[in-house]
Amino acid sequence: MINGAHAILYSDDADATRATLAKILKTRSVDAGGGWLIFAVPPAELAVHPAERGGRAELYLMTDDVGATVAALQAEGVELGLYQPRHPTPPASSASI
């Protein structure tokens, strides 16, 4: 049974990216060794979009209020992809594979 997902971000300044994520996610994390933080993240969705060539991936963090969240993050000097779902979302507890 699949019970979660592990997303990986590649960065040319991993320490700074980890520090930014810690600041904006405000969630638990564990050090997997050498400062490699693994963050607990809120529920997630996975979608497949059509493309002429596959293999591309994108990560957007979800929020209930894009405008307010963008303003708060910009005040911190943070720019990242945000997504405010406008569609029904599957309940996390009913997913089973």
Image: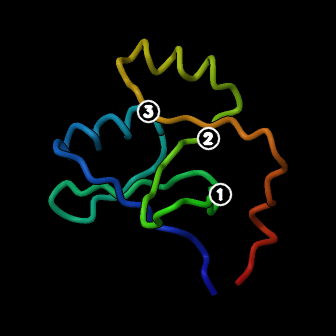
Query: Which residue is located at x 43 percent, y 16 percent?
Result: 74
Q: Quadrant of the C terminus?
A: bottom right
**Cα distance in 3D space between marks 1 and 2:** 9 Å
Task: Estimate the x, y position of residue 64 in percent, counting from the top left.
Answer: 71, 32
Q: Amino acid at mark 2?
A: Met
Query: Which residue is located at x 74 percent, y 63 percent?
Result: 92
Q: Secondary structure at mark 1?
A: loop
Query: Which residue is located at x 48 percent, y 49 percent?
Result: 59
Q: Which residue is mark 3?
A: 80
Q: Which residue is mark 1?
A: 45
Mark closer to the chain start, 3 or 2: 2
In the drawing, what numbered circle is on residue 30?
A: none
In the image, taking residue 18 as reference, residue 93 lies left or right, namely right
Labels 1 & 2 near each other (Cβ < 8 A): yes
Q: Which residue is mark 2?
A: 62
Query: Label 2 neighbourhood size at 10 Å, few (<14), some (14-19), many (20+)?
Result: some
Q: Amino acid at mark 1?
A: Glu
Mark closer to the chain start, 1 or 2: 1
